[in-house]
Image (cartoon, rainbow, N blue to C red):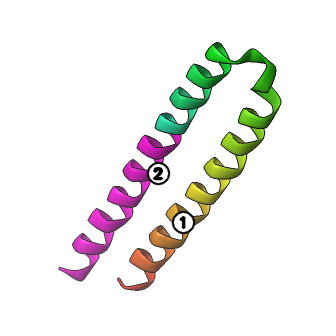
């Protein structure tokens, strides 16, 4: 039973990370379209945010698999 819950937790973490990064990418593209002169700042912030989300998702997957 614990293994099943760990797999569900890991899956939810990955789905959440994918949705979060997609949302960041969408917002960044909209911001760049509205203000092309700020593209470098927006891109840098987007990459940092995506990296932080990936780190949290990886941590959540590892915790879920260790809890198994």
Helix, strand or loop under label 2: helix
Residue 13 against residue 22 in the figure, above or below: below
**In the depicted view, which residue is nearer to us: 56 or 28?**
28
Q: Mark 2 vs mark 1: which is more N-terminal?
A: 2
Percent across and percent down for residue 22 are 49, 35
Quick one: SS at disc 1?
helix
User: How dense is the environment of label 2, judged by Cα within 10 Å: few (below 14), some, or many (20 and up)?
Assistant: many
30, above or below 55, in the image: above
Q: Quadrant of residue 40?
A: top right
* Residue 12 included in the magenta stretch of the image: yes
| Residue that mark 2 sits on | 17
Q: Residue at 74% across / 16% down in the picture?
A: 36
Quadrant for the C terminus, please: bottom left
Kindly identify the residue that appears in the image at 52 percent across and 42 percent down: 21
Residue marked by disc 1: 56
Q: Position of residue 60 (x, y in %)?
A: 46, 71
Residue placed farthest to the left in the image? 1
């Amino acid at each position: 039973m614990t293994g099943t819950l760990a797999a569900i937790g890991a899956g939810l973490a990955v789905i959440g990370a994918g949705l979060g990064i997609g949302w960041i990418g969408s917002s960044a593209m909209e911001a760049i379209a509205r203000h092309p002169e700020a593209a470098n700042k927006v891109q840098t912030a987007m990459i940092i945010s995506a990296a932080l989300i990936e780190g949290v998702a990886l941590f959540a997957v590892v915790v879920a698999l260790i809890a198994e």
